[in-house]
Amino acid sequence: MPIHYHVASLPGGQIGFRRLTAVLPPATLFCAMVQQNPTTTSPSFRQNAPLIMAILLLFDSFHFVFARLLRVYLPPVQAALLVLGFATLETAVFLTWRRRVQLKILRQHLWFFAAIGLLVAGATSLSFASVRYVDAGTASMLAQTATLFALAFSLLWLREKLYRLELLGAGVALLGIFVISFQPGDVLRLGSLLVLASSFLYALHTAVVKRYGQEIDFGNFFLFRVGSTTFFLLLFLMGQGSWQQPSGIAWLLLLLVATVDVVCSRVLYYLALRRLQMSHHAILLTVSPVIAVLWSLLLFGEAPTWQGFIGGTAVLLGVALVTWQQRRLAVAE
C-alpha cells in the first residue's frame, strides 16, 4: 500500500523498517503499557531522539489521512468502530499474555471510563466524518484548536493561571478558526464545524483524564479507554441501524490504522512524554499538521484553499504562542 512505501523512505535519510524496529521494536511500544513510571532513559533512546521525534511526527500526522483513506471503503462510525475494535483486541491480547489485566480497575473507575469512552467515541466519529467535507490537511490544522480548548478547561475547571502571551495566542488562533470556518460553501463550513466539535470533545476528555486518571495503571487505563470507546461506537452504529460489509482491502487497512493510529501512536506518545522534554511534545503538536498537508497533497492531490491555508497558519501560530509560553514556564520551574 502507498503508506508503507512512504514510511520506509522518509525525507532526510534512508530510514527503513529494519532501522525503525531496531530503535523502537514493537515489543518496546507494547512493553511501555506495563511500565508504571518509566523514568529512566536508555542510551539507545537518547542517541536516537531525533529519529524518535520524526516517527512521532509521522504517526501524529496520519490521523486525518487515515480517515480520508477509510472514507472510500466505509461510513465514518463503522470505520471508527472497527479501528477501535482492532486496537482493543491487540491491547487485550498483549496484556492478557503479560497477565496484567485487572478488571477491578474497571469496576473502581467505571464512571471515569464511561465518560472518556463516550467523549473519545464522539470525537473519533466526528473526525472521521469531517474528511468527507474538508481536506485532511485543513482538518489537521484546525484540530490543533484542541490545545485552546484544553487551555480553557485548565483555566475554568482546573483554576490554572492564564498569561498574556497565552491570551494573544488564543486570539490569533481564534481568528484563524474564523477564517477557515467561514469559507464560501456550506460543505466547507460543515467540515470545519465537525473538526471543531471533535477537538472540543477530545480536549474535554483530556481534561477529565488529567483530573481523575493520572494514577491509574497505564496498561489497564489504555485497555479500558479503547474498550469503552469501542462500546460507545457500537451503540452509535446500532442507533444508525446500518452495516456495510468491508472488502478484503478494507480489513487490511482497518488493521493498519488500528495498529499505527491508535496503539503505536498513543503508546509511543506516552513513552516519549515520559522520557523526552516537555518542549518536544509542544513542538510535535504544532508541526504534525504540516506533514498532514503534505500527505494529503501527495496521496490524494488535495490541498487547503488559500483561505484555509491562511486560517490554518494563524491557528498554528496561535497554538505555537500558547505552547511557547508553557515551555517558558516549564524551563523556569
Image (spheres, helix red, strand yellow):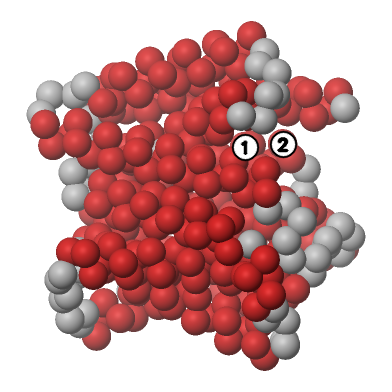
Q: Position of residue 35 (x, y in %)?
A: 79, 69
* Mark 1 vs mark 2, CA separation in Å: 6 Å
Q: Which residue position is annotated with label 2?
A: 279
Return the residue nearer the eye: 125 or 11.
125
**The N terminus lies in which quarter of the figure?**
bottom left
Task: Name the image quarter holding residue 177.
Answer: top left
Q: Quadrant of residue 223?
A: bottom right
Q: Quadrant of the C terminus?
A: top right
Residue shown at 43%/25% (left/top)?
A: 315
Q: Nearer the viewer, residue 36 or 294?
A: 36
Q: Amino acid at mark 2?
A: Ser
Please say if 213 is above or below 240.
above
Q: Is residue 207 above or below residue 259?
A: above
Eyeballing the image, is 38 above or below 212? below
Residue designated by label 1: 283
- Say whether residue 53 is visible: no
* Residue sitting at x 58%, y 56%: 112
Residue 129 in the image: state x and y as whole percent. Answer: 25, 52
Position of 6 with respect to 283 (left or right) is left
Quarter of image, res 91? bottom right
Q: Are marks 1 and 2 in contact (CB under 8 Å)?
A: yes
Q: How far from the left and from the top, in percent, is residue 218?
A: 70, 65
On the question of residue 217 being in view, the answer is yes
